[in-house]
Image (cartoon, rainbow, N blue to C red):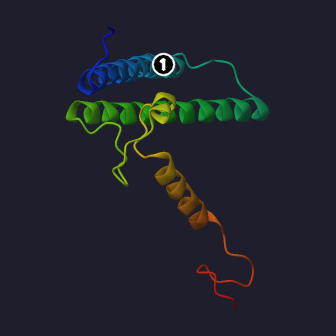
Amino acid sequence: MSYVPSDRARAVARRAELKEMLEARRRELLVAVQGKMRDARADVTEASPDVLDDAESSQHDSQEDIEFALLELKAETLVKITDALAHLEAGTYGRCRECGDEIAETRLRALPFASRCRDCEEHRESAGRRERVPPRRGQTPLGFQM
């Protein structure tokens, strides 16, 4: 006779696996963010004596902007992961914050800090796109013809 784990045992194993996945991602991001911050501090303290022309300066500024944007994204992801870990500890992890349904395990594996189910996220994104679409010429922002 083979052993079939209970629903509770499966839930405990799933929770432990998800927690380890979130913590591993958190550690990875912390190392990356701390490294970028160290590099940025070193760049500031090692001000280059070289004089850059306008094109080089513009390229350097663009590169710094891109690196800063990437750093911000990583920091935001860290906040989301920390929030997901708190929900895991509270027993509310894996539930959609909009409808309360369970978030599909495939979605959580792909995006372990997902806070909405696929349907609610798609609805939120489409609503956001509708808000950003400028009105066509001759229409008011609410869509009424003039």
* Circle count: 1
Residue 31 found in image quarter? top left
Q: Is residue 110 above or below residue 116?
A: above
Pick the quarter of the image with the N terminus.
Answer: top left
Q: Which residue is mark 1?
A: 32
Q: Is residue 135 above or below residue 115?
A: below
Q: Nearer the viewer, residue 96 or 45?
A: 96
Q: Nearer the viewer, residue 3 or 66?
A: 3
Q: Position of residue 77 (x, y in %)?
A: 44, 33
Residue drawn 58% across the image and 29% down it: 67
> Label 1 crowding class (10 Å Cα cut-off): few <14, some 14-19, many 20+?
some
Residue drawn 73% across the image and 85% down it: 138
Q: Position of residue 28 (x, y in %)?
A: 45, 17
Secondary structure at badge 1 equals helix
As drawn, is 134 to the left or to the right of 112? Answer: right
Q: Position of residue 57 (x, y in %)?
A: 71, 32
Q: Position of residue 88 (x, y in %)?
A: 28, 31
Residue 21 found in image quarter? top left
As drawn, is 27 to the left or to the right of 64? Answer: left
Q: Is residue 133 above or below residue 64?
A: below
Residue 12 found in image quarter? top left
As drawn, is 98 to the left or to the right of 72? Answer: left
Q: Residue at the left extreme?
A: 90
